[in-house]
Amino acid sequence: MKFLTKHELKELTGYSSSSKAKEVLTRQGIGFVTDAQGRIKTTPEAVNAALINTKETQVYEPNFNNFK
């Protein structure tokens, strides 16, 4: 299992502070855990799952009423 690096977490959240990064991850619906030293552990899969499940994801269907 691959965890995001400290650098990747900062790039994702915009924060190097763990408390601020946790706020961002929670707000964005990205699952994470903390290890015994309080470091954030999350995976690329958790980030992708949150991206796929956002409310902004929409399915567009054609308007079949225009075809006659």
Image (tube, rainbow, N blue to C red):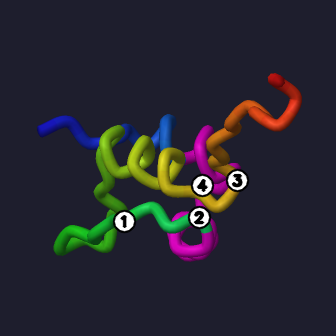
Q: Quadrant of the C terminus?
A: top right
Q: Position of residue 36 (x, y in %)?
A: 17, 74
Q: CA distance from mark 3 to mark 2?
A: 12 Å
Q: Counting residues from the N terminus, which is met first, the one under dot 3 or under dot 1?
A: 1
Given this view, does label 3 or label 1 mark the residue nearer the observer?
3
Q: Counting residues from the N terminus, which is met first, the one under dot 1 or under dot 4?
A: 4
Residue stretch rendered in magenta on the structure: 10-27
Taking depth in this image into account, of 50 and 61 the one nearest to the observer is 61
Q: CA distance from mark 2 to mark 4?
A: 17 Å
The image shows residue 33, relative to residue 6, as above or below, that is below
Taking depth in this image into account, of 12 and 61 the one nearest to the observer is 61
Circle 3 residues within 10 Å: few <14, some 14–19, many ≥20:
few
Residue placed under numbered mark 3 in the picture: 56
Q: Where is residue 67, by image quadrant?
A: top right
Residue placed under numbered mark 2 in the picture: 28
The image shows residue 54, relative to residue 18, as above or below, that is above
Given this view, does label 2 or label 4 mark the residue nearer the observer?
2
Identified by mark 3, the residue type is Glu
Q: Residue furthest front?
A: 68
Residue positioned 45% across, 61% down in the render: 30
Q: Which secondary structure dominates the residues rendered in magenta? A: helix
Identified by mark 1, the residue type is Gly
Residue 31's tag is 1
